[in-house]
Amino acid sequence: MNKVRELQSFFYGQNFADGIRVTIGVLLPALLFSYMGQLLTGITVSLGAVGASLADSPGPVVHKRNGMLVAILLCTVVAMVTGFAQRHVVTMGLEIGVFCFLFSMLLVYGMRASLIGLGALLVMILSMHRPLTNVQVFQYAGLVLTGGVWYLLLSLLSHQMMPYRPAQQALGESVREVAKYLRIKASFYRSPTDMEPEYRRLVAQQVLVSEKQVAAREVLFKSRQMVQESTDTGRTLVMIFVDLVDLYEQITSIHYDYASINEKFAGTGVLRDISEIIERLADELDRIGLALQANYQPGTPLNVLPQLESLKQKIEAIDVQEPTAHTLVLKKILVNIRGIVQRLTDIRSYFNTEAAQEAYQNRELQFSLFVTRQNFSPRLLWSNMGLSSSVFRFSLRMALVAVVAFALTRLFPYGEHSYWVLLTVVFILKPAFSLTKQRNVQRIIGTVLGGAIGLLILYLFKNETIQFVFMVLFMTGFYTVQRMNYVLSVTLVTPFMLILFSFLGGGGLAIVEERLVDTVAGCAIAFAATYLILPNWESKQVGTFLQNALKANLNYLQVLAGLLAGNAVSNVQYKLARKEVNVKSADLSAAFQRMAAEPKSKQLHSREIYQLVVLNHVLSSYIATVISGKINAQPCLYPEAIQKNVRRSLHLLTEAIRHLDPAFQLHEAAHSSGEPSTDPPATLSADDRLLAEQLEFIRKVAADIHKYTSPWPNPGRGKSRRVGCWFQKTKPFRR
């Protein structure tokens, strides 16, 4: 059933819909002009459509429209400049260097701006081999403009016809990633002998969940139909997302000392039951996600009440058989699972528009606080003009390597399509070494596989109609999976190009050999450049992400401290702190994953950084575990024995941040240097004793973070060296 749902999700997903739209937008002009006997004109119009389509990445329709308008303008200007510059090798080389640098610098304005720059570079590369007269240059630029405008109108029309589909698809994908996260959580209750692989899976999935939630939040909270017009469908989607984030926290809060729990209760069978119930809840969440993507009502709700009742009886039986077993933690897990069940019930209820409208009116929702505003000031670009900016280093590397690749193809031409080397460099070279390395391997594998498939089709099917059908299928597949699976996208685009060249009078084994040689040359140049020219090693940057994650956790812990001190904390304040923790923790996890793919010699203290990534995750999970049961309760002043550990945790966490950032100011509540409470447990209720144990665990995690961020000895020089010193040479770009 999981395989079937994956297949259904693919065809109902945003990527497949985008693939169909881009295929129509790019293919139709070429077909129409080909029918009129002007195939070359049609290909030029299609090139303009391709350049505009890169700006049509997921997001609010206003952002898409503005991005495509900028892309159309840039592609038109680039086509015109290239038409004149390609007449001499020097002017063409200068254009390549300048445009590669400037368009790569657009990354400071976000991913959409980066894709706009990539589209402009694509137009430049595919235009530089066409000799044009002065009049033809303007005609050529006009055709590129026409193609861009055509694709813009197609995209806006599709949105007008189905205004809610992008939001439904983005939200459905977000729901399904949370379901995968929940399944990984279930694995911790299966008595694993080694939890490190499970934590690595959890950290990797946390990154995906964060990416999908950010994408869904952008589409929902920046779209007028969702938050201003307040239509029935808009209310439904907004309320599902709001409860999905709450559900994600509820899932995160199923976090206790797994090692201790497995040691105490592995033989009772109760942990296996917990794991099975969580797996069933993940399946239910998966079905809801698919219903959102496919735009239909979910089926019959899952009934886990009998299993929950059976689990409750088993926990009570353990209490009777072993009165000293301290099953309160199991009862808390049961409460958390019931909370997840209730969240799932609420999400299902929002498919009824009346329930969604009532919930929408009763919620304190301030959407503007939960979305980030991209800064498009020219000052941002200027502030990144220096070697301290990773984007500047990447842009400079891109410009140098592109000019070198262009010079090599002119000095040592190989075949008629030597521009493929430059095209490979531009698309392979990424700011991070790990991604460039991964793309190198994937592109070579995809080119070999795709070349073999293309040759096989051309050999077996001589009928041009059948070949055309295959070409359309490969083209659609390429545009569908290009954001999902790079090796598959290259595998699909290669036979598409071979069949296209066959229609143009070329094709065959010679084209495959040329493409393979050019691909390998481009990959080798890009890989060497990433290693040798102004490299950005992640170990020198991960400290900034670590600081941000710890600061977010400190703020999250402050919310908990306020609740335990009897202060009223608004839902908005609490949710903002929670959102910041999720985003910053995912950024840290992604940075560590990139570092893990770099050469071993560049992974400075990778083991310690991994421990910090896990400890950061455990800390936020444990804070969520405690805070989720307190946020909606009446304000209550807890005993000093409980509050003291919170203050100690704040102090340790603040000091850990100061190890990374000496300028960081001590938190006012962290001045206490008191030790963990020694109040007798008998003075506390059973719930308070469990709370005290949880807060003690938080203090221990904070102490471990403090230890790992403390100055470490430098064996090479015999001096003390701070973690933060690694990361101050090269910092992520300023936003």
Image: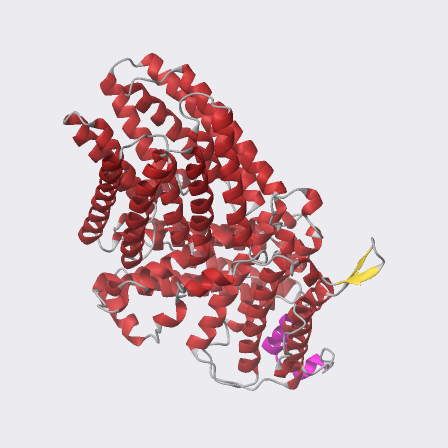
Q: Is residue 342 above or below residue 573?
A: above
Locate the N terminus and report the quarter of the image it occupies. top left
Q: What residue do we see at 22% from left, 41% from top?
A: 142
Give the quadrant of residue 330.
Answer: bottom right
Q: Is residue 614 left or right of residue 45?
A: right
Q: Is residue 345 left or right of residue 101?
A: left
> Residue 262: image x %, image y %?
65, 55
Q: What residue do we see at 39% from left, 50% from top?
A: 286
Q: Is residue 312 visible?
A: no
Q: Which range is magenta?
A: 680-694
Q: Main structural element of the magenta stretch: helix, strand or loop?
A: helix
> Residue 51: image x %, image y %?
32, 43
> Of 702 and 500, which appears nearest the observer?
500
Q: What residue do we see at 45% from left, 65% from top?
A: 379
Colour pattern: secondary structure
> Of 88 and 45, which appears nearest the observer?
88
